[in-house]
Amino acid sequence: MFDKYEDECGVFGIYGHPEAANMTYLGLYALQHRGQESCGISAADGMRLRTHLGSGLVADVFKDDEIFNKLSGDASIGHVRYSTAGGDNIRNCQPIAVDYARGSVAVAHNGNLVNAREVRNALEEKGSIFSTTADTEVIIHLLARSQSDSLGDRISEALRQVRGAYSLVFLTETRMVAARDPHGFRPLVLGEVDGAYVVASETCALDLIEARFIREIEPGEMVIFDKNGMTSYHPFEERTPSPCIFEFVYFARPDSTIFGQQVYQMRKGFGHQLAREHQVEADIVIPVPDSGVPAAIGYAEEAGIPFEMALIRNHYVGRTFIEPQQSIRHFGVKIKLNAIREVLQGKRVVVIDDSIVRGTTSRKIIKMIRNAGAKEVHMRVSSPPTAYPCFYGIDTPTRKELIASSHTIDEIRKYVTADTLGYLSLEGMLEIAGAPKGAKGHFCEACFSGNYPVKFPRLKSDDQLGLF
């Protein structure tokens, strides 16, 4: 397996379209990079809410017309998932759909609630019974317990009791609601197609269905879609926005625009800055595909060194595979990447990757490049050292597993066997990303700095897991 942060989740919703479920399917297809473990769609026809869930990729879970015949209606929400909280049990697939005293509701969530265990424990003491281990179910229980008359009030009352990251889409029999946490950790955009409103984690989902981008859902905003149109509220206490800068580094698709900026251009900018900070004499610049490509282009442009694609990725490899009984060294990396000897032979190579997590994959890639005949291998990373885990919707290793948390840059260089190693500085990254000089909190960069915008309860089990 690749030594990478795992993608988190993607959400999509559409209100007022005669083929809502089909459009949601396409939207999830565009967001597949954000989660590959499971997916689901809920649809509403004004009277009933119906849901179809399954483990696997979107095309595998929704593979026949019969499924869509059951998902009738002009409103629909969907979700692609990689488990960030709750594990990969089939019960944790989303949207989570329930019936309660006021009707039916389904919810799709991108993010992580830092106080989910606290709230869950309190609810269980009052008699609540949970059917999943996902933190998203906490929101549903809080919503169901609310005595408020309006759906908007019930949702806002529930969300005021949780802390952390959430880009959410709710669906009832007749309405759709989108909400984003006050810090705006995760992206959520608003669009329109054929008179129908669309919300999605990224603009690439709007592009696929030819929807017009309107704007981002703002941090702390809740938008209700019903037969009267769209109504916007800001029911939460205002906070300093802290959008996740790692969305630009790795998670978002390069053709998306998030947080008001184009991802591909941002990654190229990181590459330009990396070259300014860590120049080296070399013959070629190569990326670790696919996420390292834009930064490598930027580095090559700035350094005036030719760009080459010397590592070729196999795009048809799943998350698991059967290894041959007779061991092949570095099989996990080789099945996903192959080096072109004719490009690398006798060359001084700069290899660009977006991040180093544990360092094991970087070590194998560098050995592969050397075995293909490279004379020198200089590794450059288009983000700062990742030394802290994320609690806001990314599946990261514990801190003790992050190589940068306990090793100097030179120690990491020796471990990955590079001739030289250079990381993009945090200051350089924030400058390219557009953070005001000296500003604190314009982006969440906790995985690099340990400065967490939302504090979380420190439980004994966290110490045992090595989170601190």
Image (spheres, helix red, strand yellow):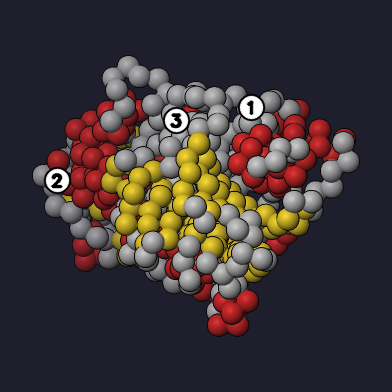
Question: Which is in the foreground here, disc 2 or disc 1?
Answer: 1
- Residue 437 placement, left or right of 160: left
Q: How many residues crowd around disc 3 within 10 Å: few (fewer than 14), some, or many (20 or more)?
A: many
Which residue is nearer to you in this view: 224 or 20? 224
Query: Which element type, helix, strand or loop, lies under badge 1?
Result: loop
Compared to residue 434, the image places residue 230 above or below, namely below
Q: How many residues crowd around disc 1 within 10 Å: few (fewer than 14), some, or many (20 or more)?
A: some
What residue lies at 39% left-to-right and 26% top-to-bottom? 442
Compared to residue 239, the image places residue 330 above or below, namely below
Can you name the residue that lies furthest to the left here? 304
What residue lies at 39% left-to-right and 43% top-to-bottom? 216
Q: Which mark is residue 242?
A: 3
Give the residue at mark 2. 301
Q: CA distance from mark 3 to mark 2?
A: 31 Å
x and y percentages locating residue 58 in the rendered image: 53, 69
Classify residue 440 by image quadrant.
top left
x and y percentages locating residue 66 in the rendered image: 60, 82
Specify which label sits upstream in the sequence, 2 or 1.
2
Q: CA distance from mark 3 to mark 1?
A: 16 Å
Q: CA distance from mark 2 to mark 1?
A: 42 Å
